[in-house]
Image (spheres, rainbow, N blue to C red):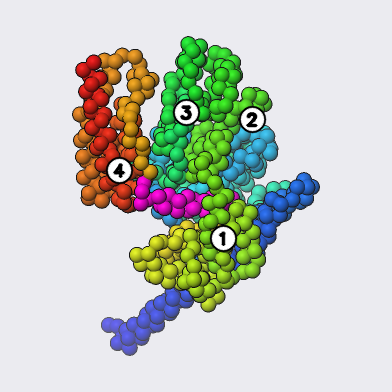
Amino acid sequence: MVHPRKTIGGIVIVSQNINELVKARESAIENAQIKARFLANMSHEIRTPMNGILGMAELLFNQIRDEQQKELLRVISQSGQHLLVIINDILDFSKLEAKETYLEHQPFNLVECVQSVVRLLTPQAEAKGISLTVDIPTDIPTYLLGDVNRLRQILTNLAGNSLKFTDKGGVQIALSLQASQETEALIRFSVIDTGLGIKPQHQSKLFRSFSQIDDSSTRNYGGTGLGLAISKQLVELMGGTIGLESAYGQGSTFWLEVPWEIADQNFSGDNLPVLDLSQMNALIVHEYENQESRRKLWHRLNYWQANVTQVQTLGLVMEQLQAGHDHHYDLIVVPYHHEVPNFYGHIETLREKMPNATIAIMLTAEELKRLQPWLAQNNLQGVVCPFTGNHILDELMAQLNLDNPGVNATMDLHQDRSKFKILIAEDTRINQKVIINQLQTIGYSAITCVSNGELALSALEQEHFDLILMDCLMPILDGYQTTEIIRDREADRQHIPIIALTASAIVGEQQKCLAVGMDEYISKPISMKALEKVLDRYMLKKIQLQGQGEPPLAVADGPWINFERLEKFWGSDQGLWKQMLLIYQEDAPLYAQELHAAIEAEDYEHIYNHAHRLKGASSSAAVEIIPHLCHDIEKLAQQKTTVGMDKIMTNIFEQLAQVQRLAQEFQAS
């Protein structure tokens, strides 16, 4: 029999132990929160002066002409960027150790993610004279759900390490599908190098914190020794595994396998900018090993209303030229194939016949390096494949004097920037000076600067601004509180874009900014190029919205059917033309009615889809005007407004009546 006192005493002791455990847990949580706040503050304190150093160096670099002085500034900038990498490594490691790292769960373009890593590291590879390539099989899903920034960080760490320790040959990032279901995929990422390889006794050290193979690695290559440890913890946080295979003297393969949710394949995270290319004629040659790249380019050019012709082979293009077909093209896209007979001669003839066209040759990074003299000699643009997102357009549009894909060639960009009114809320004087100078260098001159949120609210009462650059941590009233007040006051008034400026590198900061109503997030140190890109996008959006009350309408006069385009699309068989137009006569009125019903219901997704379908059918039937009207509706649907759509629909029905009449006359002929 158990003695009662012993039983009661035991219960008391257990109760005390539980209380102590609860207190210990609460203390641990409090310590973790204190540590997280400390990390956030340290991040801010370290990155704020770095913004001043790097920002001023960038401004000075753009003002001086002496090459020796520029080289000194390059060293300052490169050293500052290297210091930031080390700081970020230490902060990332500390956050992981404190269990304060959270993963995002957003749709993203996997191919674009991998290509962005390649673009970032290509200069490093070129400086060493080695190749950096990508292998992405066609069975890999393009769109996934997850944390794209962390995946990019891991791949950059692994590929950067491989480049660091490879002196001959090259590095390849290869993807392979290990398993897949309808909504999930297990993907293996391999970073393969031809470097020295790693001895077996050293391999177990690599994923440990602050660990390198030996002290000479630190002296020769630098770094904190945290990159692989951070990558390992991030991969495990994603539910994946990481490892390596290496043979000393032969090279290494670092790999990770991560399970992903597959995003809706109709998702497009590319955020295509507004651009009118309706006056541009483009020719795309089909001979692509990467059909996805060709499809993406066609999609973008078609989205911007370019007149796109696709031809199966380069040989057919040459036959058309020899037959005397006088086609004018602004852009010609040709894949590099040295096996094609007389490839170089054909391209040189093409250049001779079309001296003003941009001729883009699609090739690998290795081919680009080898063929650079020939490309330069013949005024050709070499673009590395596979390309994704807007990267290809960035390069090609630059050749067409459209450096910013969101800028219409007819715009007076400097004049538009000078009228765009910007309010800066930033408490640090050096940062104020950096941002103001950056804006003025870009061409934004209508600037007001205040040092806290209270003064920002006062400025908004006195004057209208087109955009606010808001520092997050300020005295009196910080950026978060100020943004919430601005959003509360806006109610039904016009929305003012607010761009967060923060020196905090803590994950979750972006979500916090968006949660209080900020539109976007720029991390300090702020690069002038990043600032320019963001501001120009909002400026263009403002210009577009100003025209919303009276959307641009196509000219309502004929011709309603372009018979030259019909011949170009379908050949000279007029019987086939009549079949195509008969199908259009039957389908187009139904498409228009469905579009009108979607507009009445203010169903923006269906508005866009029905407008896109009518536009595509009209383009295929060589019907004029209607595709442009549908494009106007698509743009309004993306802005989630039906203002002006009724007027466009009236025009569409009028155009359809004219097309029906003309098609019936042609059928009877």
Mark 3 vs mark 2: which is more N-terminal?
3
Tell which of 583 and 561 is nearer to you: 561
Q: Residue at x 21, y 17 (%)?
A: 668
| Alpha-carbon span between mark 1 and mark 4 | 36 Å
Mark 1 closeness class: few <14, some 14–19, many ≥20 residues within 10 Å: some
Is residue 603 positioned above or below 582 on the image? below
Residue tagged 1 = 446
Which SS class for mark 3? strand
Q: Nearer the viewer, mark 3 or mark 2?
A: 3
- Nearer the camera: disc 2 or disc 4: 4
Tell me where residue 274 appears, x and y as whole percent.
44, 44
| Alpha carbon separation for disc pair 1 and 2 | 44 Å
Write down the residue under mark 4: 648
Near mark 2 (Cα within 10 A), the count class, few <14, some 14-19 or many ≥20, is some
* Marks 3 and 1, how far apart at CA: 39 Å
**Callout count:** 4
Residue 369's tag is 2
